[in-house]
Image: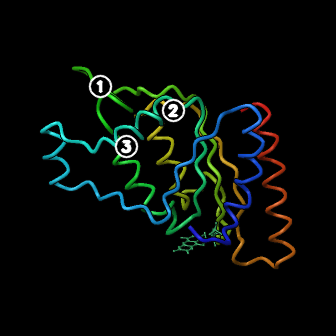
Amino acid sequence: MRPESRTLRIAEPLIAELSKRYEIETISLEGSDYPCVDYKVLIDRNNGIVPEEYADTARRIAAADRIVIAAPFWDMSFPSILKVFFENMSLFGITFNTNERECYGLCRCDKVLYITTRGMNITSGSPLEQATPYLNALSFLWGLGEIITVSAQNLDYSSPEEIETKIHDAIRRGLDICKEF
Ligand SMILES: Cc1cc2nc3c(=O)[nH]c(=O)nc-3n(C[C@H](O)[C@H](O)[C@H](O)COP(=O)(O)O)c2cc1C
């Protein structure tokens, strides 16, 4: 979201590494205007109306071999635009489906790399950290597979030198993960 994003500093070298093995497609949500899914959107969907651009993006997500999500930690989770985006991509018959008993995922992906930085000293999996529980739940709905997290924390209470060390450590851990990703 911020041009000087520390999350982006971690994400860029990892995406560059993955680009050696994968063709990369990027979706940037900064400045995007996805609407909140409200009653009007539901009525449209019930009438079979979904913007073609959204359906097309959802098809690209469903067809992806791997997904990388880079998002700062905001208000104990990820920025709401990402939730709004997920809701707009959560489309019957594209990212998930249902039968008479349950919902099931339609996505090809079986590993998601989630990259984040946190201002406070909150570790991945802490009850105070509400991003990975949601991503795990979404993975269950869409069939995205394992969520692997690369994070740096306490960045708003660290010295500039400590921040650099934490960012470099996260990049090193992430590059290791990318070897098997
Ligand atoms: C709108 C906003 C909300 C934030 N909320 C939290 C929060 O709830 N918990 C936390 O640990 N840090 C919070 N932070 C701090 C960021 O997580 C931290 O500065 C992070 O490194 C920002 O990532 P970026 O450099 O990629 O923008 C918030 C920052 C912003 C701008």
Q: Residues within 10 Å of mark 2 (few under 14, many from 20)?
A: many
Residue furthest out toward the top: 100
* Residue 10 found in image quarter: bottom right
Helix or strand or loop: what does disc 2 sit on?
loop
Q: Residues within 10 Å of mark 1 (few under 14, many from 20)?
A: few
Which amino acid does the dot numbered 1 rest on? Answer: Glu
Provide the residue designation for mark 2: 144
Q: How is the image coloured?
A: rainbow
Provide the residue designation for mark 1: 102
Determine the residue positioned at 47% across, 36% down: 61
Q: Residues within 10 Å of mark 3 (few under 14, many from 20)?
A: many
Provide the residue designation for mark 3: 89
In the displayed structure, does residue 161 sit left or right of residue 77? right
Give whichever of discs 1 and 2 has the lower sequence position: 1
In the displayed structure, does residue 45 sit left or right of residue 133? left
Give whichever of discs 3 and 2 has the lower sequence position: 3
Percent x, y for residue 166?
A: 81, 63
Give whichever of discs 3 and 1 has the lower sequence position: 3
Of labels 3 and 1, the one closer to you: 3
Determine the residue positioned at 80% across, 71% down: 163
Percent x, y for residue 41?
A: 20, 51
> Which quadrant is home to the N terminus?
bottom right
Which amino acid does the dot numbered 2 rest on? Answer: Leu
Percent x, y for residue 103?
A: 32, 28
Give how far apart the Cα atoms at labels 3 and 1 are: 19 Å
Helix or strand or loop: what does disc 3 sit on?
helix
